Amino acid sequence: MKQKIKNCLLPKEYWENEFAQGWKNGHTPNCHLLGFLNGYEIGKQILDIGCGDGRHLVPMAIAGYQMTGLELTLSGIETTQKKLADHETSAKIIQGDFHQLPFEDESFDSAISIQTLHYNDWEGARKSFREITRVLKSGGFFFFRARSERGHWRETDEAISDKGITRREYRGVEKFVVIVHDYTLSELEELASENGLTILSAHDEDQKGLPGQWNVVFQRN
């Protein structure tokens, strides 16, 4: 199994294990997302790409947004569905990954993706942005949170040949291999230009105000 997932961008077995053990469970919504929700008229039909355990999807569903979640893992989906049931609210949760979104063109008013799209190489990032733009309505917003080039490296990380900063990370006792791309501002501008998106704001900071995480609002032209 280790060899089978050695070169996977998204080792599903790793994430199944993480969500089954409660990864991020109980964390409040990210403050930068809350700023996005308060600062823009994002519509009602919202896609959460990589919704995980429902950390952001569930509160947004409770608030009245018509949420659709895309999640790679069954454990993440099951946790999210239980939270939705506990709060007597609902959302669509679909299993899949962000390289081929199972939705029709222009299906959503806006989309969010939080700490998900850095699990990519550069070509995977380009595929993801093409797909996200495709499913957004004209004028729709996309809130993107992912690692920047100012993020930290683990001692065991290994750089791989790719555009910009792409690396292998070895995770957990099983030494799962996760591919991570750290985005630069110029790369985000390139992705925007390729896909007919406008960057409305871009801040490189985490929830404590330190650099290492992009918080970007795109709008489809």
Image (cartoon, rainbow, N blue to C red):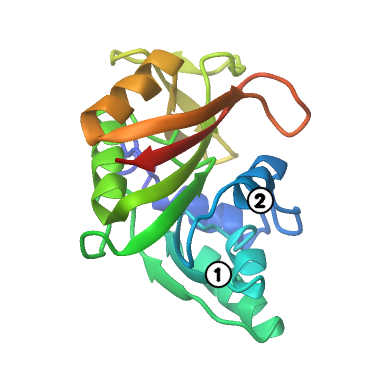
Residue to which mark 2 is pinned: 38
Label 1 element class: loop
Q: What is the total number of numbered labels drawn onto the structure image?
A: 2
207 left or right of 177 in image: right
Residue at screen point 68% across, 58% down: 22
Residue 126, position as x, y percentages in the image: 26, 33
The residue carrying pointer 1 sits among few (fewer than 14), some (14 to 19) or many (20 or more) residues within 10 Å by Cα, namely: some
Q: Looking at the image, is 221 positioned above or below residue 188?
A: below
Q: CA distance from mark 2 to mark 1?
A: 13 Å
Mark 2 or mark 1, whichever is nearer to me: 2
| Left or right side of 112 for 139 | left
Crowding near the residue tagged with mark 2, few <14, some 14–19, many ≥20 C-alpha atoms within 10 Å: few
Placement of 202 over or under 195, stated as above or below: above
Amino acid at the residue labelled 1: Tyr
Q: Height in image: 152 above or below 178?
A: above
State the image coordinates of residue 101 (x, y, percent, origin top left).
Answer: 27, 57
> In the depicted view, which residue is nearer to us: 109 or 11?
109
Helix, strand or loop status at disc 2: helix
Answer whether residue 8 is visible to the viewer in this image. Answer: yes
The answer to which quarter of the image holds residue 56 is: bottom right
The picture places residue 143, in percent across and down from the top left corner, at: 50, 43
- From what the image shows, is residue 119 above or below residue 134? above
Q: Residue at x 29, y 40 (%)?
A: 221
Left or right? Give the position of 39 relative to 98: right
- Mark 1 lies on residue: 65
User: What's the residue type where badge 2 is placed?
Assistant: Asn
